[in-house]
Image: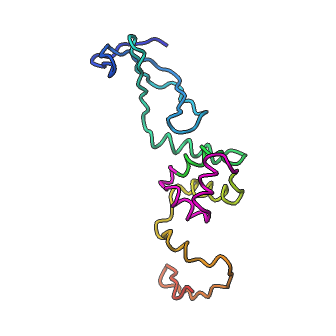
Amino acid sequence: MGAETQKGMKCTECGAAMSTRTENHRYEECGLRYVTLRGISVNRCPDCGNFEVSIPRLEELHRLIAKCLIEKMTRFTGAEIRFLRKILGLSAADFARRVGVTVETVSRWENNATVIGTQADRLLRLLIALGKLPAKYPAEKLDLIDSGKASDTRLGLRLQGQAWSAEACA
């Protein structure tokens, strides 16, 4: 793959003209060690060795990485958990509250001190597969759930025109 010099593209380190070529790039910036971007533009300085990688459509790329991760047949590594948590837009504390564990547990997962449990692993896969967090269910409600008690829920549901509505949820 040949290099071509970009007019006006100057090295931010030494000011020399940069050359652009199509290369493979190990995308460690995402926090995952084994992601390789194939055939992307890389600007290189022939004088000082500085380089800049041009990664188009970054959000789409991250969604694709997340999709590939949830399709794997083993539990997540710590780096994968951190990447997916960030894709969901959650801090470690918010993620811990939603999954029902402590922040310390999330930290142990993300630092590979403890393997993520199968239930939490599956929940994380489902959250990613859904593509977003439910906006109508605030995390504060999760704190109010009595984890020591199970009870039947009484519902009154009514069909009004073409839509169902709940009269009572308790």
Measured from the top left, where is residue 91 in percent x and y?
49, 55
Does the magenta segment cover residue 101? yes
Question: How many badges with numbers are in the image?
Answer: 0
Left or right: 115 in relation to 24: right
Does the magenta segment cover residue 124? no
For the record, the magenta segment spans 86-114
Image height check: is 136 above or below 85?
below
Please tell me in which quadrant of the rendered image residue 149 appears.
Answer: bottom right
The residue under the point 43% across, 38% down is 57
> Which residue is at the far left?
8
Measured from the top left, where is residue 139 in percent x and y?
50, 68
Q: Nearer the viewer, residue 64 or 120?
A: 120
The residue under the point 62% across, 44% down is 69
Measured from the top left, where is residue 136 in percent x and y?
47, 70
Give the image's coloring scheme. Answer: rainbow
Image height check: is 158 above or below 93?
below
Q: How would you classify the magenta stretch by its main secondary structure?
A: helix
Measured from the top left, where is residue 32 in percent x and y?
57, 38
Q: Nearer the viewer, residue 30 or 165?
A: 30
Image height check: is 123 above or below 149?
above
Quarter of the picture containing the C terminus is bottom right
The residue under the point 69% across, 51% down is 114
Image height check: is 149 above or below 8?
below
The residue under the point 47% across, 54% down is 89
Left or right: 94 in relation to 18: right
